[in-house]
Amino acid sequence: MKELLDDLDRWRAAGTRVALARVVDVEGSGPRGPGAAMAVSLEGEVVGSVSGGCVEGAVVTEALSLLHGEREAGIVTFGYSDDEAFAVGLTCGGTIRLFIEEFNW
């Protein structure tokens, strides 16, 4: 999460809304462990990583949906057996759970 701090400070100073996604659980093989984080600004700027690239695009979509009021904060799950996860490239054989919420300054 430390790698996000400079960008979070910049976005805060600009009054930009931001969604934060954090890995909260990994079952089996996972690309990043619990605590890995990614932030997405309302403008679609992204910093950090929650999966080493394999589901980042889907996480950005979920984060922007949250910021646009199309979904609520909560858990999003990606696993090898999920069609969506396979389509976005989570082929490591595990399951990752992310908590996505709006970052409140």
Image (cartoon, rainbow, N blue to C red):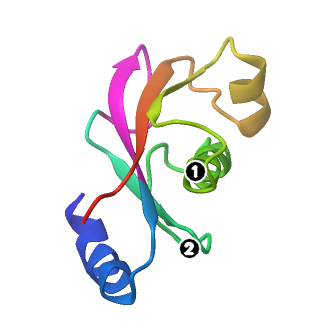
The vertical placement of 22 against 5, above or below, is above
Residue at the extreme left: 2
Name the one closer to the observer, 4 or 70: 70
Q: Earlier in the sequence, mark 2 or mark 1?
A: 2
Residue 96 position in % (x across, y down): 46, 25
The structure residue drawn at horizontal position 70% and vertical position 16%, both measured from the top left corner, is 82
Counting labels gives 2
Where disc 2 sits, the SS reads loop
User: Label 2 crowding class (10 Å Cα cut-off): few <14, some 14-19, many 20+?
Assistant: few
Q: Is residue 23 magenta?
A: yes
The residue labelled by disc 1 is: 53
Q: Which residues are magenta?
A: 20-33
The residue labelled by disc 2 is: 45
Left or right: 67 as drawn, with respect to 9: right
The structure residue drawn at horizontal position 20% and vertical position 64%, both measured from the top left corner, is 2
Residue 3 position in % (x across, y down): 27, 68
The structure residue drawn at horizontal position 75% and vertical position 26%, both measured from the top left corner, is 84
The vertical placement of 60 against 25, above or below, is below
Residue 105 position in % (x across, y down): 24, 66
Residue 89 position in % (x across, y down): 70, 36
Q: Is residue 68 magenta?
A: no
